[in-house]
Image (cartoon, rainbow, N blue to C red):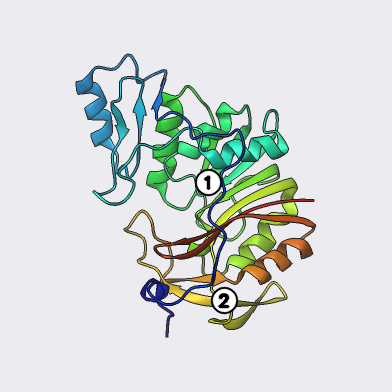
Amino acid sequence: MFTKLRNRISRVRLKWRPAMRYPGIMEAETRIDIARIASMSDAELERLNALLPWAAFVNDAEGRCFGRAYSSRKRNEPQAVPDRRILELDRRFGLAGKRVLEAGCFEGIHTVGLMQQKASVSAFDGRIENVVKTLVRAWAFGQKPDVFLWNLEEDGEPPFDIGCDILHHVGVLYHLTDPIGHLAQVLPRVREAIMLDTHIARAGEGQTGKSAGFEYRYCNFREAGRAPPFAGLGDHAKWVELDDLRRFLVQAGFANVDVAEQRDERNGLRVLIFAHR
C-alpha cells in the first residue's frame, strides 16, 4: 500500500530550519526583457500562449504574461529569471563557461536562467511537450540550449552525452520509481558539483529498499501519471530519507554535502542540497 504523504501534513512534525535567504542575493525582478517577445503585439503574444499547454509564466518588460498560470493556486505568479537557487549555484561554483546538465527542464525557465549566467546547457525532460516549450522559451530569450527527450522511467541509457561539470536537478528525483538507480547512472558523469532540490521521506516512517547495491529507506508516494504536468511518469515514486540521500552522495564521490535549506511544504519535507567533489 502506498504511503500517502499528503495526508500526513496535519501531523506533528520535526523542527526544521526555515528556508534561508542568501546574503546579498535577492529575488530577480519579475518583469524581464525578453528579446523576441518585446516586438510582439498583444494579439501575437496571445496566439503564442495559446499554441502550447503552458503551466507557468514569466512577465515581459511591460508586465505581459509569456506562458500561462497552471491554475488559480499553482504556478499562478510570474516566475523569476534567474531563480534564486541558480544565483546561489553560480555564487558557489561559477557557471560561466561550465557545461550544465539540467534534469527535467519543464518549460525552460531554469534553462534560460542558467544560460543567462553564461553556462552551456544540455537539458532533458520526459514529456515531449516540455521539450518543445523549453525550445520556444529559449528562442524567445535568444538562447540556444541543447534539449532532449529522455524518459527516465523507460528509456534506459540517455540518447545524448550527459557528461557535465555541474548537474542542476530540481523537482525531479521525488517523481522517480528508482531515484537511487537514477543517481547511480548520472552522478559518475558529473565532474564538479550538483544542486539537488527534492522532497524527502520523514525519518523512520518508511521501508527499506535496495538499488545499485545501495540499501536505503524510503516512502512510496502515489503519482498521477502522464497527463498532469507536475506528476511523475510512473504510477508511484520513492521519496528517500535525507540521511540516506546524503550518504549516497558521499559514496558517489561528492564528499562535501551542504543541506542548505530544509522546508516543510504542503506536500511534505523538501531539501535544497549543494554538493561537490
Quadrant (top left/top right/bottom left/bottom right) for the N terminus: bottom left
Of badges 2 and 1, the one in the foreground is 2
Secondary structure found at label 1: strand
Residue situated furthest top in the rendering? 39
Q: Position of residue 217 (x, y in %)?
A: 61, 78
Residue under the point 46% across and 30% down: 138
The answer to whether 253 is drawn above or below residue 44 in the figure is below
- Residue indicated by mark 2: 218
Residue under the point 37% across and 74% down: 10
Seen in the image, is 232 located left or right of residue 208?
A: left
Taking depth in this image into account, of 18 and 140 the one nearest to the observer is 18
Separation of marks 2 and 1 at Cα, in angstroms: 26 Å
Taking depth in this image into account, of 114 and 268 the one nearest to the observer is 268
Residue under the point 22% across and 28% down: 46
Label at residue 124: 1
- Badge 1 crowding class, 10 Å Cα cut-off, few under 14, some 14 to 19, many 20 or more, is many
Label at residue 203: none
Q: Position of residue 236 (x, y in %)?
A: 44, 72
Q: Position of residue 276 (x, y in %)?
A: 75, 50
Q: Position of residue 176 (x, y in %)?
A: 51, 65
